[in-house]
Image (spheres, rainbow, N blue to C red):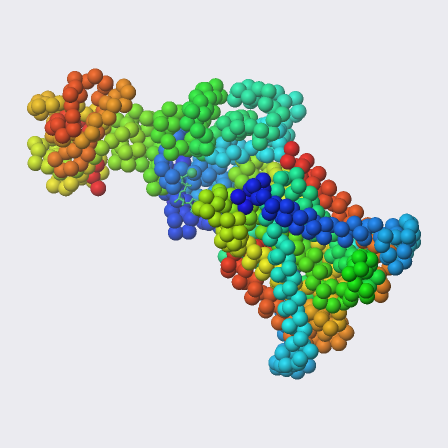
């Protein structure tokens, strides 16, 4: 009997280990894909930044020591910050309204938000290229109203990029912020009113502080996404205000300078991951990219 | 001697350094209703899951009709189970849920239909065949789960706290259903619960689990009258404990003294007792007598001061404090002469039959 | 007060106005493009002098547009199948498994979602140059799979975590082989998660521009690449027609998703 017990015991232990390994094995196809076609290529690219044309940090010295490149960094930052602030200023009242308006109205707005998010990025950018061009509807309307005499340059500059990117980022700040405001108990604001707070005081002292975590988290997300944006800046921005993602593409495609491309990629990567880590630290795993 | 129907032998399960159960030995007769009773975390579910084949034991064996089940995978064990949570297949109707094990066994359509109707009748849910689980109450879902588990005539039915998510009234209603179904089908049931009342109401025999071992196995009355450990005494029925000193022992009976009182002879003793050592004397509230004025002559008694008197309908509950500050409860029928005019602070004598009390050592 | 729509007073109208304007800001450009695709003006003058189907005719007459659309569809379809399959298996491991480093693995699987796509595009481009996958369907599929998989894993782990494993255990005790139990019980019960994984994966690939620009060759390009290349030259109304077709596909998928979700609920 003891013999029997022993065998069944070791069989039991072996089986649970087998189950565990089987569970791990299930993740192997995904792991292989990510390792070979994500981790490895990205690491290889970063490695090239210190290996080409010769080993050392020459690429970084050039990247951080050349006015042209520094200007691009600054511009990337300015555009991203601008887009974030504008998105937040528009997004907060919209999310607030969505959280309290009758569901028949909010359903329509949600449908529009989701349709917009799901519409091809190029289509949306193209729409703004057409709308903002010299002979576009916006310039024509403004001239027709007699507000301006000459068409305004709205495209291939900071205005164009900001409008186009805000257009794309708005849903990303409205939806999470809506969730945050939705979870605030209306009774808290009733209590504030009973305490004698005016509407404005209730807004600045109660509602905004309560919604602040959502605002910061949404803003960080929009900022991070904007930093690495490629398509919209490339089409709506001008050569004078190139952004970092475009610079990386240009290093690789037009200049075939892999060392500099890798260095610029590392800068973008470090900034992105740092901000993302801050986001994680502050707010836990965010549902980034949820559509 | 005939082969026992279900035999569990030396069962043990370790999770890393945690031992969930150990030294589980149990024999269940065909058609018996056996309940595992014990507090949460005492290893009841683990034992059941090993029987179901979801966990492998670290040691030990399970024999059904003399054949070991250990090597048989869950889906070939032909065991039925009702789980603690609702486990109806959400995308299938009630009828399809009950038909599922039969389809898996490749029964013919006519046979399946007939069986599904029979099972629905058994659990009294005729006419619910087309419903989806989400459209049913928790109690109804558990009845369907029961029908599904019984559809293929399993020799053994496992039930892991199937009623714990239901409210008290519904729970009692379904307990009656389970009893009736057990009598009608004569299936062998292993039932897990942490509710002593449920265990007493349903079971032929009860295995009391404590910290991963079975403390005692027996019928409800046996456990109540003869608890073999302090834990069982506490878990089945109400009990109070008084510290005492063992004077001497023989044949499982001990002589003991409480405080400075007279020796009390012939109390059944459990555990390893040593003369001169301290132990706990267990007294049940409903088996104590209460007298006022002078101590009773016919039996040993303890003097105590009344702390509180509670009227509980048919009973009156008196809490009293002994000389050493331990609290004892007495339950007396309404209108008992000794309770007339009794008030807090009165001195009373609590008498008991030594043969009906128990001493636990260690 | 501030969270009670009817007691906001004048503020209510301010909020409504901002929301209305924002909704208009979001929807009008899309409608505008759809309208222009039927307009006769080569220079995209609005309102158009007259209406025409000319740009659609041009689109369907040009084999390069059609080929690009077909390529997009083919790649998106393959990516969808692979992403759901790999994501499903991995999700079972991630949700049910108990092994060291599980959480790290989960985080690793989601990183392609937060990394700027341009970095991945450049890195993969370099890697594919070396192993000769640039300009191939395989290259496209791999690239899109890397960015689609996180959505798939996110959707499926989400539903799988909400699925009580006891239900699958019950099916096994009913006599179903563990694999059969997964196929007949677990998969149907989590089908809405599988469906959103499929929709997200398809759209991720179908709409993807940046990776595609790098993977494309003159002979193999997706619809977004074709639009991108055309846009860099001029704003021809054919792009408006192509865009409108894309919007129609999107709306069709949205409606399908809504219908399926409704169907699954009842
Ligand atoms: N999968 C597991 N891993 C580690 N410990 C476990 C596991 N399952 C149960 N245990 C431990 O085993 C003991 C018995 O658990 P269980 O059988 O579920 O108790 P019960 O059903 O009586 O409440 C508990 O201490 C529990 O923490
Ligand atoms: Mg349990």
- Can residue B269 be seen here? The reply is no
* Quadrant of picture, ligand 2: top left
Foreground pick, B129 / A238: A238
Coordinates of residue C244 in the picture (x, y in percent): 81, 51
Choose between B14 and A60: the one closer to the eye.
A60
In-image side of A129 versus A15 (left or right): right
From the viewer's perspective, is B225 left or right of A264? Answer: left
Q: Position of residue B308 (x, y in %)?
A: 20, 29
Residue A227 vs B127, above or below: the answer is below
At 61% across and 57% down in the image, what residue appears?
A88
Rendered image quadrant of residue B103: top right
Residue drawn at 41 percent across, 27 percent down = B168
Which residue is at a point 34% across and 42% down the rendered structure image?
B211
Q: Residue at x 55, y 37 (%)?
A: C167
Q: Is residue A267 visible?
A: yes
Residue nearest the viewer, comparing A89 with C109:
A89
- Quarter of the image where one finds residue C232: bottom right
Q: Residue furthest front?
A: A146
């Amino acid at each position: 009997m003891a013999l029997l017990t022993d065998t069944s015991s070791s069989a039991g232990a072996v089986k649970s280990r087998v189950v565990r390994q089987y569970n791990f094995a299930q993740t192997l196809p995904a792991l292989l894909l990510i390792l070979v076609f994500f981790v490895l290529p990205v690491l290889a690219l970063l490695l090239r930044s210190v290996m080409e044309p010769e080993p050392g940090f020459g690429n970084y010295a050039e990247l951080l020591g050349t006015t042209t490149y520094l200007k691009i960094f600054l511009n990337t930052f300015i555009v991203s910050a601008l887009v974030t602030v504008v998105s937040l200023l528009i997004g907060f009242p919209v999310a607030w309204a969505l959280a309290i308006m009758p569901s028949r109205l909010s359903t329509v707005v949600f449908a529009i938000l989701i349709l917009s998010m799901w519409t091809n990025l190029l289509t949306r950018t193209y729409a703004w290229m057409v709308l903002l061009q010299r002979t576009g509807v916006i310039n024509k309307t403004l001239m027709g109203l007699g507000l301006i005499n000459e068409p305004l340059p709205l495209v291939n500059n900071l205005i164009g990029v900001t409008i186009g990117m805000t257009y794309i980022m708005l849903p990303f700040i409205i939806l999470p912020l809506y969730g945050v405001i939705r979870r605030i108990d209306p009774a808290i604001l009733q209590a504030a009113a009973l305490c004698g707070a005016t509407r404005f005081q209730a807004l600045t002292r109660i509602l905004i502080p309560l919604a602040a975590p959502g605002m910061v988290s949404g803003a960080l997300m929009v900022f991070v996404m904007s930093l690495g944006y490629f398509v919209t800046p490339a089409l709506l921005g001008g050569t004078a205000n190139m952004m970092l993602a475009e610079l990386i593409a240009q290093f690789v495609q037009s200049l075939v300078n892999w060392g500099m491309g890798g260095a610029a990629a590392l800068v973008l990567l470090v900034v992105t991951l740092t901000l993302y880590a801050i986001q994680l630290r502050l707010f836990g795993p965010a549902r980034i990219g949820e559509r | 001697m005939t082969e026992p129907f279900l035999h569990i032998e030396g069962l043990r399960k370790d999770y890393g350094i945690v031992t969930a159960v150990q030294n589980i030995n149990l024999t269940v007769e065909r058609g018996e209703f056996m309940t595992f009773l014990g507090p949460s975390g005492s290893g009841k579910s683990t034992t059941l899951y090993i029987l179901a084949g979801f966990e492998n034991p670290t040691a030990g064996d399970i024999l059904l009709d003399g054949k070991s089940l250990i090597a048989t995978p869950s889906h070939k064990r032909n065991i039925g189970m009702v789980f603690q949570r609702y486990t109806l297949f959400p995308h299938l109707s009630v009828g399809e849920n009950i038909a599922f094990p039969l389809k898996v066994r490749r029964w013919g359509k006519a046979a399946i239909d007939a069986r599904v109707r029979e099972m629905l009748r058994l659990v009294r849910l005729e006419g619910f065949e087309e419903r989806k689980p989400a459209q049913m109450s928790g109690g109804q879902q558990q009845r369907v789960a029961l029908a599904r588990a019984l559809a293929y005539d399993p020799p053994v039915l496992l039930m892991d706290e199937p009623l714990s998510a239901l409210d008290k009234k519904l729970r009692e209603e379904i307990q009656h259903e389970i009893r009736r179904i057990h009598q009608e089908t004569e299936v062998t049931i292993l039932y897990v619960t942490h509710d002593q009342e449920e265990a007493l109401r349903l079971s032929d025999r009860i295995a009391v689990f404590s910290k991963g071992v079975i403390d005692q196995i027996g019928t409800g009355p046996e456990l109540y009258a003869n608890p073999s450990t302090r834990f069982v005494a506490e878990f089945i029925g109400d009990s109070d404990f008084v510290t005492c000193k063992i004077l001497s022992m023989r044949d499982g009976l001990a002589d003991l003294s409480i405080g400075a009182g007279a020796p009390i002879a012939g109390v059944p003793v459990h555990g390893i007792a040593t003369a001169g050592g301290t132990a706990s004397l267990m007294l049940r509230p409903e088996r104590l007598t209460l007298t006022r004025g002078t101590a009773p002559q016919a039996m040993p008694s303890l003097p105590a001061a009344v702390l509180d008197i509670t009227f509980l309908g048919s009973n009156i509950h008196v809490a009293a404090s002994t000389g050493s500050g331990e609290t004892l409860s007495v339950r007396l029928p309404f209108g008992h002469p000794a309770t007339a005019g009794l008030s807090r602070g009165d001195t009373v004598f609590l008498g008991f039959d030594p043969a009906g009390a128990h001493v636990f050592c260690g | 007060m501030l969270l009670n729509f009817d007691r906001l007073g004048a503020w209510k109208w301010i909020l409504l106005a901002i929301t209305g304007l924002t909704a208009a800001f979001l929807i009008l450009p899309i409608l505008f493009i759809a309208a222009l695709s039927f307009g006769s003006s080569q220079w995209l003058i609005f309102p158009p002098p007259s209406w025409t189907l000319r740009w659609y005719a041009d689109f369907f007459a040009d084999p390069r547009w059609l080929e690009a659309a077909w390529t997009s569809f083919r790649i998106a379809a393959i990516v969808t199948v692979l992403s759901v399959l790999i994501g499903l298996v991995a999700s079972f491991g991630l949700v049910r498994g108990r092994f060291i480093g599980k959480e790290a693995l989960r985080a690793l699987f989601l990183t392609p979602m937060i990394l700027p796509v341009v970095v991945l595009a450049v890195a993969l481009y370099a890697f594919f140059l070396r192993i000769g996958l640039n300009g191939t369907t395989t290259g496209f599929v791999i690239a899109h799979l890397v960015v689609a998989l996180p959505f798939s894993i996110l959707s499926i782990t989400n539903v799988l975590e909400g699925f009580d494993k006891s239900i699958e255990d019950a099916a096994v005790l009913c006599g179903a082989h563990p694999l059969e139990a997964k196929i007949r019980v677990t998969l149907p019960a989590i089908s809405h998660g599988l469906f959103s994984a499929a929709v997200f994966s398809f759209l991720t690939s179908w709409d993807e521009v940046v990776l595609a620009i790098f993977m494309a060759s003159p002979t193999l390009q997706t619809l977004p690449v074709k639009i991108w290349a055309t846009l860099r030259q001029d704003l021809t109304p054919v792009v408006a027609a192509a865009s409108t077709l894309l919007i129609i596909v999107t709306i069709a998928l949205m409606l399908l998703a809504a219908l399926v979700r409704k169907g699954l609920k009842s």
